[in-house]
Amino acid sequence: MKSRYVIKPGADRDLNDYADYLARNASLEVALRFLSAAEDTFALLAKQPKMGWPSRLKHPDLKSLRMFRELSASL
């Protein structure tokens, strides 16, 4: 079963802006790898939303934030 997730318009714009930056300042290959890694990470989080560990951030708006390190062979 494929997990579902939604990328909000502002986040989509940010991802595309950064990919454009990478394409101009690194290479198209790096930009495409960035977008692929982002998509893979979103899919992983959609399947396992409670993965990682609770953050220790003090700001109340960030209390529910969880942290994890994604290790990818493609990067």
Image (cartoon, rainbow, N blue to C red):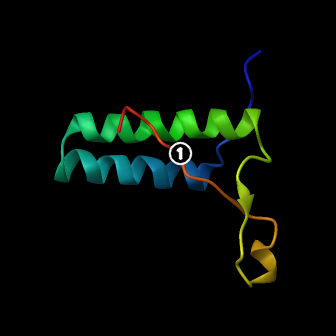
- Depth check, front residue: 7 or 48: 48
Quadrant of image for the C terminus: top left
Percent of width and height locating residue 51: 74, 46
Q: Amino acid at mark 1?
A: Glu
Give the side of residue 15 with respect to residue 54, left or right: left
Percent of width and height locating residue 6: 70, 39
Point 42% across, 47% down: residue: 16
Percent of width and height locating residue 20: 31, 48
Point 78% across, 44% down: residue: 49
Give the side of residue 21 with respect to residue 65, left or right: left
Question: Is residue 5 at all visible to an observer of this figure?
Answer: no
- Label 1 residue SS: loop
| Above-or-below relation of 63 to 67 | below
Q: Residues within 10 Å of mark 1 (few under 14, many from 20)?
A: few
Quadrant of image for the N terminus: top right
Q: Residue furthest top?
A: 1
Point 66% across, 48% down: residue: 8
Percent of width and height locating residue 11: 57, 53
Give the side of residue 36 with respect to residue 21, left or right: right
Point 81% across, 81% down: residue: 60
Quadrant of residue 30 in the image? top left
- Depth check, front residue: 21 or 67: 67
Quadrant of residue 21 in the image? bottom left
Which residue bears the numbered disc 1? 70
Question: Is residue 9 at all visible to an observer of this figure?
Answer: yes
